[in-house]
Image (cartoon, grey):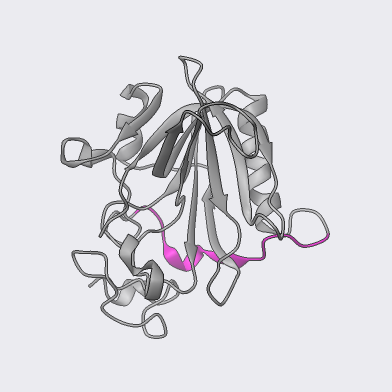
Amino acid sequence: MPISHYGVLKGKVTDSMKGNEDSPHYQVLVEDDQGTKYRIAINIKSQSYPSEVLYFVSDDFNSGNITLLPGIPSGFTEINDNRSGLALDYIRGNLFDPKKMIPLPADTPGPDNDLNDKINYYIEKAKNEKAVIYAYGDKWGPEPDKPDQYFNFLPGNGIHDIHMNQGNVGKWEKDNGTWQDGGVLIYFEESQKWVGIFLAFQSQSWCTDDQGNATRPVSECNYLNAGKSKK
């Protein structure tokens, strides 16, 4: 079954928090034009082996999706059949060359050498330049009686699964679907450029059927040889 509340969150970054061993997510506090707060939880470590998350960033991203994004309202927009032109699919959407993805550890001593550092660079830049961020994934909340556990706002509210959401096996197979992949797009108005950040797990197959389920094991169809088959 596909993830339940797929969509895109549009807003401005107001704060962030790096992940650690106890919380392997990079957390981003976002506020929309109405003052509603959301948290974006970005995976920086996989629960499946290998733990290093696949990462690709485009500093000058260009796709048909971005022509639609400025026209959506601030806040969360659910993507369904009526909004299908907004959806992301790493395999079918030709967003980027998966062979350009690199596996990165979550947190390693030293500068600019792990996923925490890479994501932090763009999130801090977005905050400082008041760029508009668009986060794709699965929404949770609002939780009226539960303050956010990281930024303490109420009601708790946010979006997760900011990564490829197909080709999963085992207990994550239930989340599989097509045209429901996560990611982060950031528009920097001053330079008029888009940055695209895309994440996937090394345990995910890049050959999937119309339900997003793996048709070949990841040992035969992974990010390095995905172009050989898109079924």
Q: 53 or 129, which is in the foreground? A: 53
Q: 92 or 27, which is in the foreground? A: 27
> Where does residue 47 sit, x and y in percent of width and height?
55, 69
Query: In screen coordinates, is 162 left or right of 179?
Result: right
Residue 139 to residue 222: above or below: above
Residue 174 falls within the magenta-colored stretch: no
Count of marks placed on residues? 0
Residue that lies at the very extreme toward the bottom in this rendered image: 219
Q: 164 or 37, which is in the foreground? A: 37
Query: In screen coordinates, is 26 left or right of 186?
Result: right
Image quadrant where residue 106 sits: bottom right
Q: Main secondary structure of the magenta part?
A: loop
Residue 106 falls within the magenta-colored stretch: yes
> Where does residue 161 sit, x and y in percent of width and height?
45, 52
Q: Residue at x 33, y 48 (%)?
A: 88
> Where does residue 212 sit, x and y in percent of width and height?
26, 65
Q: Residue at x 62, y 39 (%)?
A: 149
Residue 51 to residue 59: above or below: below
Residue that lies at the very extreme toward the top in this rendered image: 34
Residue that lies at the very extreme toward the right in this rendered image: 110
Q: Residue at x 70, y 47 (%)?
A: 18
> Where does residue 227 sit, x and y in percent of width and height?
33, 72
Query: In screen coordinates, is 51 left or right of 174?
Result: right
Rendered-image quadrant of the C terminus: bottom left
Q: Which segment did they paint magenta? A: 95-109
Q: 158 or 183, which is in the foreground? A: 158
Q: Residue at x 50, y 64 (%)?
A: 100
Residue 80 to residue 168: above or below: above
Rendered-image quadrant of the N terminus: bottom left
Residue that lies at the very extreme toward the front in this rendered image: 145
